[in-house]
Amino acid sequence: MGCIQSITCKSRIKRENIVVYDVSATIDHCPTIIEENSPIVLRYKTPYFKASARIVMPPIPRNETWVVGWIQACTQMEFYNTYNDIGMSSWELPELCEGLVRAISDSDGVSYPWYGNTTETVTLTGPTSKPSRFTVSMNDNFYPSVTWAVPISDSNLPLLTRIKRDQSFTTWLVALNTATREKILLQTVKWRMRVDILVDPSMPLGSRATLMGRTHQDQPRVLTRMEPIPPNALGRPNANDAQVLMWRPRKGPPLVVIPPK
């Protein structure tokens, strides 16, 4: 017997009916690039993490809409900028640091829960009579600015001596029913980006910074099992809005330089 109201019926879209192939997750095989063009800030640009997959979705029933795409969350972050023996600034995710959550959404801040809404997702609205074939892809990298001078100082004296960053992410390929919010996990990827830059502030601008340690990143891991998505990975706030810039002096109490949004 057919359903009188499809909204009350369980969708016919099942994991075993979705074909996922040509899954790719890589980090470009190139070093982090350091830019010393500004007398105010040092900038660095890491290689890109890239993920893509080809998908075949079965026909979509009437009155159903499915979105297939990438969801990403930050699961660990250490980001310290040391200023000689004076202290250090650090970007922090307090709830993550304190163990209150296991992950923070890394959405673009608009397209929750998705990482983005261009190449990252495809929307399918039923009824469709034939299978749908498509590709979803995403990329991510770091391109921040770090002040040469102590961030709470009025002085422009360059004192930056070290930048260390170590950040981990989990990225999921997901099919989502927009009405029922049913999620079908299709793939899980884990990746990590590390940066270590040594700075000699006494040198002229353009020759102060040196990339230390590894020149290439470890490649992402495409898991053979599905890892559940923590609730905080699906909604507000995202990592950019949740992060706090702290100043932690060698002597004295820490100060909030930039609060969360």
Image (cartoon, grey):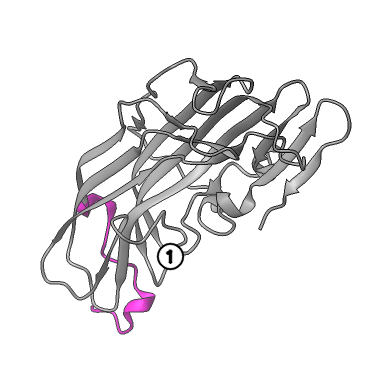
**Magenta span of residues:** 1-18
Quadrant for the N terminus in the image: bottom left
Q: Which residue is at 64% across, 41% downward?
A: 96
Q: Residue at x 26, y 65 (%)?
A: 12
In the displayed image of the protein, which residue is found farthest to the front? 204
Q: Quadrant of the C terminus?
A: bottom right
Q: Nearer the viewer, residue 12 or 161?
A: 161
- Magenta span main SS: loop
Question: Where 119 falls versus 204 (above or below)?
Answer: below
Amino acid type shown at disc 1 = Arg
Residue in view at x 48 percent, y 37 percent: 37
Q: Is residue 236 above or below residue 93?
A: below
Quarter of the rendering containing residue 32: top left
State the image quarter where residue 226 is shown.
Answer: top left
* In the image: residue 236, left or right of residue 48: right
Figure disc tally = 1
Left/right of residue 202 with respect to residue 173 in the rendered view = right
Single out the residue that lies furthest toward the bottom. Answer: 4
> Is 243 inside the magenta-drawn segment?
no
Magenta-colored stretch includes residue 11: yes
Q: Residue farthest to the top?
A: 213
In percent of the image, x 64 and y 20: which residue is there? Answer: 202
Numbered disc 1: secondary structure: loop
The residue to which callout 1 is attached is 181
Q: Is residue 257 above or below residue 64?
A: above
Q: Camera-side residue: 15 or 248?
A: 248
Closer-to-camera residue (196/93)? 196
User: Crowding at label 1, few (<14), some or many (≥20) Cα neighbours within 10 Å?
Assistant: few
Residue 65's x, y, as percent? 30, 71
8 w.r.t. 240: above or below: below
